[in-house]
Amino acid sequence: MNDTGDSYENLSRRTSRHNNDEMKLYQEMMAERMLCMGSSRVNEALHAVVENKLHETALSESNNSVLERNRALLQYIATLADSNKKDDRFNYEFVESLIEGGANINITDQHGQSIFHEVARSWNVDVAKFLLEHDGEINKQDSFGRTPLHVAVSEDFAEMVEFLLQNDADIDVRTSGEIQAPIHYAAKNGAAKSLKLLLGYQANIDSLDYRQRTPLQVSTFL
């Protein structure tokens, strides 16, 4: 139950996935260059779909009650991720009950994907606020080094990107192997709105990945 006395289910905006149908034009010259240099690459959006299998580190939990609550939490999020329907609703009260029973809000699947990765992909920012209120790790990296910010910019989910940046998401965090920052992910996925936000928060336009490529070079690499 929230502090207004209304159940979360009565607040449809708070429980829903976001609607990303509206696309605003981005006029900033550098980002325009990054997106319009003739690349024929297919958009490579990152789909952070949480799977229903606990990461091996979570299986070491000695308290069976906590372990089962962790399984239940991961199963719930994996079910939502697999459904991926616009009319899905996030059940705050159910998740909160699991957390109060000892479940770890930062539990991850076999690929290191957390609830925050899934929420950053497609859920209303109110769900992300809920995670932060319950000690969700905003800079949680999966097994590939990707954070919720990498996910949000890949989907060009501008509202979530701004929320994450306003709440101390690491703007220069790097993935494993490719050593790519969120701005590389935004560039290679043609994420115009997210590029504008990242640049506004002083993301490094000359940031280099493991092959010494800038975001501009990554966006045009075939």
Image: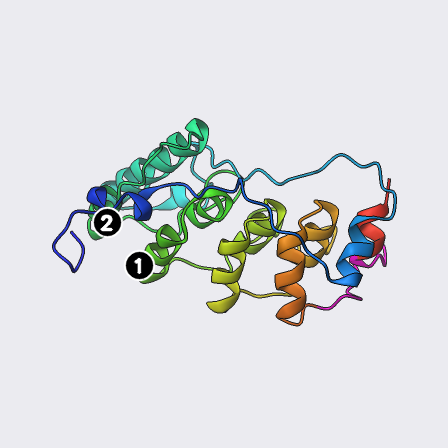
The residue segment tinted magenta is 204-215
Look at the numbered disc 1 and give the secondary structure of its residue: loop
Residue kind at label 2, given as amino acid type: Glu
Which residue is tagged 2?
A: 96
**28 and 148: which is toward the camera:** 28
Mark 1 or mark 2, which has the lower sequence index? 2
In percent of width and height, residue 111 lies at 54, 40
Quarter occupied by residue 194: bottom right
In percent of width and height, residue 88 lies at 35, 33
Identify the image quadrant of the C terminus: top right
Apparent side of residue 86 relative to residue 152 in the rendered image (left or right): left
Q: Compared with residue 72, is residue 24 higher up or lower down, i.e. above or below?
A: below
Apparent side of residue 198 relative to residue 219 in the rendered image (left or right): left
**137 and 204: which is toward the camera:** 204
Q: Are marks 1 and 2 in contact (CB under 8 Å)?
A: yes
Q: Residue at x 54, y 44 (%)?
A: 22
Report the predominant secondary structure element of the magenta stretch.
loop
In percent of width and height, residue 124 lies at 40, 48
Look at the numbered disc 2 and give the secondary structure of its residue: helix
Category of crowding for the residue at label 2, using alpha-carbon neighbours closer than 10 angstroms: few (below 14), some (14–19), many (at least 20): some
Which residue is tagged 1?
A: 134
Residue kind at label 1, given as amino acid type: His
Q: Compared with residue 222, is residue 148 higher up or lower down, i.e. above or below?
A: below
Residue 176 visible: no
Quarter occupied by residue 85: top left
